[in-house]
Structure formats: structure tokens, C-alpha cells
Amino acid sequence: MSDLAVADVERSLTFYRGLLGPLGWVEEDRFPTYRGTEEVIYLRDPTTRMALGLRPVDGGAHRYYDVGIEHLAIEVDSRDEVDAAHERCVADGARIHHPPEEDRDIDGYYAFFVFDPDGMRMEVFAWPRAQDWAPSPEYRN
């Protein structure tokens, strides 16, 4: 379970419902936070029980590649699900960082990257892992 502090909870909730809802994620809980000054909303994948919380930020702005989260990755079962998530983001006007493509270093790893409304980078990927997977020599350097 992870929580993201966001500038506008409803705007972010709309984004994450659009991205994750068709993958089976549902809004599960709304709780007052330990500070008692705001509410945290949890979206959860009922199959894996992975959860993502959204709560209002106290101030400031996220900047890609500053201190903090570089990206958050969500694994799906197939390339078709990656493509469908990408298409939903494009239709919703989200800012795409990289369209779906196979990774140049990891065979079979297929992903796309999108920025959420606060500029946090999200990855949706499918990867039929080989048991003996190891990164290519160029990747390890």
C-alpha cells in the first residue's frame, strides 16, 4: 500500500480511476488520516490487494526527477492491457511520456509511461518473465 499526496484529490481520483478501473481496481475505502485534517481515498486491486491512496498535499509541487518518487509501476497480464491503458490515457488527454514499446534491455518487457495530473510518472507494463532472466551486459554497466 502506498499513498500519494496530490494537489487535487478529485482530479487525481478521476485520472487513477480511468487508468486503473478497467484493470479491476476499485475505490475501497475512505478514511480520516492520522492527522485528522484530511481524508485518504484508497483504490485497490481486489486480486493482488495492492492499494494506492490519494490524499491532499499540504503545498508545493512535484517535479519529475527531484527528490521523491521517480515513477510508480503497475503490472498487468498482457500487452493488450498495456495498449488499452495507453489508449484510455490518450483519450482522456493525459500527458504521455513514452508510448507502448518493448524495452531495449529486457526481452518481452512491454510498457508505457504517463504523467498523472501532478506530474508523477506512472508505468503500466506486462512482462512474461523468464526464470533465468538477467539484464543485458549493457544494462548492468
Image (cartoon, helix red, strand yellow):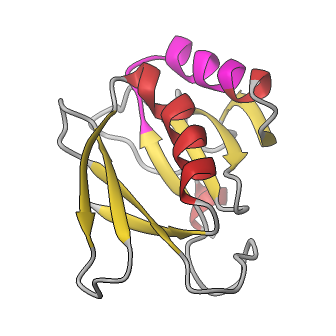
Is the residue 123 above or below the residue 39 in the image?
Answer: above
Q: Position of residue 56 (x, y in %)?
A: 51, 71
Tell me the quarter of the image containing the N terminus: bottom left
> In front: 54, or 136?
54
Q: Is residue 109 visible?
A: no
Majority SS type along the magenta span: helix
Q: Position of residue 55 (x, y in %)?
A: 44, 67
Q: Residue at x 54, y 37 (%)?
A: 124
Q: Residue at x 64, y 68 (%)?
A: 7
> In front: 14, or 125?
14
Q: Which residues are magenta?
A: 75-88
> In front: 55, or 67?
55
Q: Position of residue 25 (x, y in %)?
A: 34, 32
Q: Is residue 77 magenta?
A: yes
Q: Is residue 31 visible?
A: yes
Quarter occupied by residue 48: top left
Q: Is residue 95 magenta?
A: no
Is the residue 90 above or below the residue 134 in the image?
Answer: above
Q: Residue at x 45, y 17 (%)?
A: 78
Q: Residue furthest top?
A: 80
Is the residue 16 above or below the residue 91 in the image?
Answer: below
